[in-house]
Amino acid sequence: MFSPRDAVMPQAGFVCYRCGHNLSPAERAFCGECASPIPVLIPAHSGCGASTLAAATGFRDGNESPYASNHDRALRLLVARTHHAGLEAARRELARRRSSGHVARLLLVPDAPGKLPKPLADEVLVIAGPTPSSRIPWMEAWRWAPGAATETFTKFFPTLAAQLTADHS
């Protein structure tokens, strides 16, 4: 049986994070194999990295998938950078969506290599509140090849898949 820990980086197209099924373009909101909701990356602000993450993960890009991002069964993942402006945009978007639409998880894309400074780390805790969050590791290679499969992200992806599975089991 497929486990999120067995998840591998998709090579082309969309792959279900939960069962590994290759998704057709018609499967816009949920996997036809296991009926899991398909993750849709919703950008909190421009330049947040949602398109890069979509290329790396095979998740739907909310900028390009209005059907999926508005569908009731879509698994909405809000994406923001970890700089102050990005976190403020995430705060506003989470506040707006808590009343009108669910956000399953906040994905935080680093704005620089290294550890997040304490004031920003504290801000993340306040902003996310009850919304689970994941910090994407820094990918130097993505500066030149957005979404390229890197060893670091290839190791991180099963962790993200497991978190999404745990959130929606």
Image: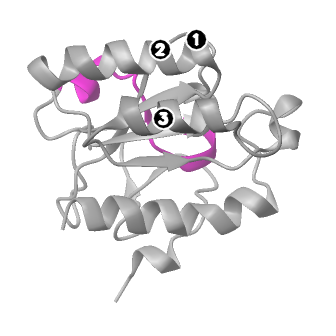
What residue type is disc 3 on? Val
Disc number for residue 85: 1
What residue type is disc 2 on? Glu
Whole-Å distance between the Cαs marked 2 and 1? 5 Å
Element on which disc 1 rests:
helix
Q: Which residue is mark 3?
A: 124
Q: Position of residue 32 (x, y in %)?
A: 21, 57
Residue 59 in the magenta stretch? The answer is yes
Q: Which residue is mark 2?
A: 88
Is 66 in front, or is 160? Answer: 160
**Disc 2 packing (10 Å; few <14; some 14–19; many ≥20):** some
Whole-Å distance between the Cαs marked 2 and 3? 10 Å
Image point (22%, 14%), residue name: 96
Vertical placement of 33 versus 140: above or below? below
User: Which corner quadrant holds the C terminus?
Assistant: bottom left
Image point (25%, 43%), residue name: 130
- The residue segment tinted magenta is 54-70
Vertical placement of 45 versus 38: above or below? above
Q: Do the CB atoms of the residues marked 2 and 3 lie less than 8 Å apart?
A: no
